[in-house]
């Protein structure tokens, strides 16, 4: 069927098509012009909102550089400098180390990366220091001849742990870079140490604490060897402690398998315990801390917790770079306990 206004509709559609095509071409020309201006200026042009002209999305704020990132850059530099110790690169690395000591991690990371690039592009080579020759009396006469050198005593390869009750056993964590007014919560008081020695009889007490949410692997075997081995070396005892705090992912099958693996590797636990056996006692401790004002129940959501953590990380960097006492400096908004 035909309609009286059909030619009029066709004309309107043609006009709209041409208009859309014109706007599209104009918009394309505008963005190409803006891109040319930005490239000629050598840097992005900024609008009143702080965004680059042509950017459709705002650029996120740069996150603070962590200590681990700076140390990783240092390790990468040292690998290159060991083979190509360029003097200029080593000089830049000294500046980076100064920045790292001053906890300016962003500057330290940039300088270590610059020093690495200088060494990589250098033709310098490490000079091997020749070893001093052995005295004639200590050299082997033949391939199978015994050496006249006296046998050295066997060197202890394990960790040199302090004796129970000694001065080195009183401080669990001795950090030299703690701020002047910071409190070290990892210090055993004389009263607490005396109570501990009375309860343990001065014996080493270690534990192997797997979570029964799967089967053990080679990494567990290494931890097991250390836990049981240290206790056996010093005449102590080792607990097999099941950290069963997530019932949704744990099964009796895994508990039985772990016990079997421990016995198969030749270890005998002094006692087998479960974290879930102490839930009621831990709950009472938590209630007591809340009543004393030392703890609170947090109702933050996961995004809110992540935002608070990011604020506190920035606050700690701010205190470190400006030598501010962390416990006496007011927290920024959103960094304190909610409520």
Image (cartoon, helix red, strand yellow):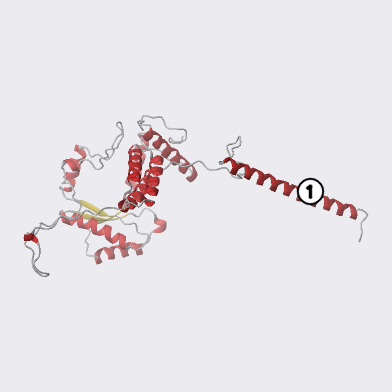
**Residue toward you, 45 or 85:** 85
Which quarter shows the N terminus?
A: bottom right
Q: Is residue 335 left or right of residue 30?
A: left
Residue 299 picture location, percent across and down: 46, 41
| Picture residue at 19% right of the left edge, 37% below the top | 190
Q: Secondary structure at mark 1?
A: helix
Badge 1 density bin: few <14, some 14–19, many ≥20, Cα 10 Å:
few
Q: How many marks?
A: 1
| Picture residue at 66% right of the left edge, 44% below the top | 33
Q: Is residue 288 left or right of residue 3?
A: left
**In the rendered view, would you say 28 is above or below 216?**
above
Most extreme residue toward the right, as rendered?
4
**Residue toward you, 92 or 174:** 92
| Corner quadrant of residue 157 | bottom left
| Corner quadrant of residue 213 | bottom left
| Corner quadrant of residue 312 | top left
Residue underneath mark 1: 19
**Residue toward you, 187 or 175:** 175
Residue 334 picture location, percent across and down: 47, 35
Residue 261 picture location, percent across and down: 28, 65
Residue 101 picture location, percent across and down: 32, 38
| Picture residue at 83% right of the left edge, 50% below the top | 15
């Amino acid at each position: 069927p035909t309609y009286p206004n059909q030619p009029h509709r066709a004309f309107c559609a043609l006009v709209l098509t041409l208009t859309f095509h014109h706007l599209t071409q104009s918009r394309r020309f505008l963005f190409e012009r803006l891109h040319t201006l930005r490239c000629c200026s050598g840097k992005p042009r900024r609008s009143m909102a702080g965004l680059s002209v042509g950017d459709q999305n705002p650029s996120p704020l740069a996150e603070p550089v962590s200590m681990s990132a700076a140390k990783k850059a240092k390790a990468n530099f040292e690998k290159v400098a060991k083979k190509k110790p360029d003097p200029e690169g080593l000089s830049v690395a000294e500046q980076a180390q100064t920045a790292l000591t001053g906890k300016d991690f962003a500057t330290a990371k940039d300088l270590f990366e610059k020093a690495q690039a200088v060494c990589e592009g250098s033709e310098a080579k490490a000079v091997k220091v020749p070893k001093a020759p052995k005295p004639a009396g200590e050299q082997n006469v033949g391939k199978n001849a015994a050496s006249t050198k006296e046998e050295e005593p066997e060197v202890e390869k394990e960790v040199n742990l302090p004796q129970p009750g000694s001065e080195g056993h009183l401080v669990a964590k001795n950090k030299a870079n703690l701020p002047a007014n910071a409190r070290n919560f990892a210090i055993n008081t004389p009263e607490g140490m005396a109570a501990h020695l009375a309860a343990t009889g001065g014996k080493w007490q270690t534990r192997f604490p797997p979570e029964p949410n799967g089967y053990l692997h080679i990494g567990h075997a290494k931890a097991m060897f250390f836990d049981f081995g240290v206790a056996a070396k010093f005449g102590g005892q080792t607990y097999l402690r099941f950290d069963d705090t997530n019932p949704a992912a744990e099964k009796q099958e895994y508990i039985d398998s772990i016990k079997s693996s421990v016995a198969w590797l030749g270890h005998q636990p002094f006692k087998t315990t479960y974290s879930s056996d102490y839930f009621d006692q831990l709950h009472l401790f938590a209630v007591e801390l809340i009543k004393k004002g030392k703890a609170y129940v947090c109702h933050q959501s996961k995004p809110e917790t992540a935002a608070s953590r990011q604020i506190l990380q920035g606050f700690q960097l701010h205190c470190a770079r400006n030598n501010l006492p962390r416990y006496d400096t007011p927290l920024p908004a959103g960094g304190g306990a909610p409520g």
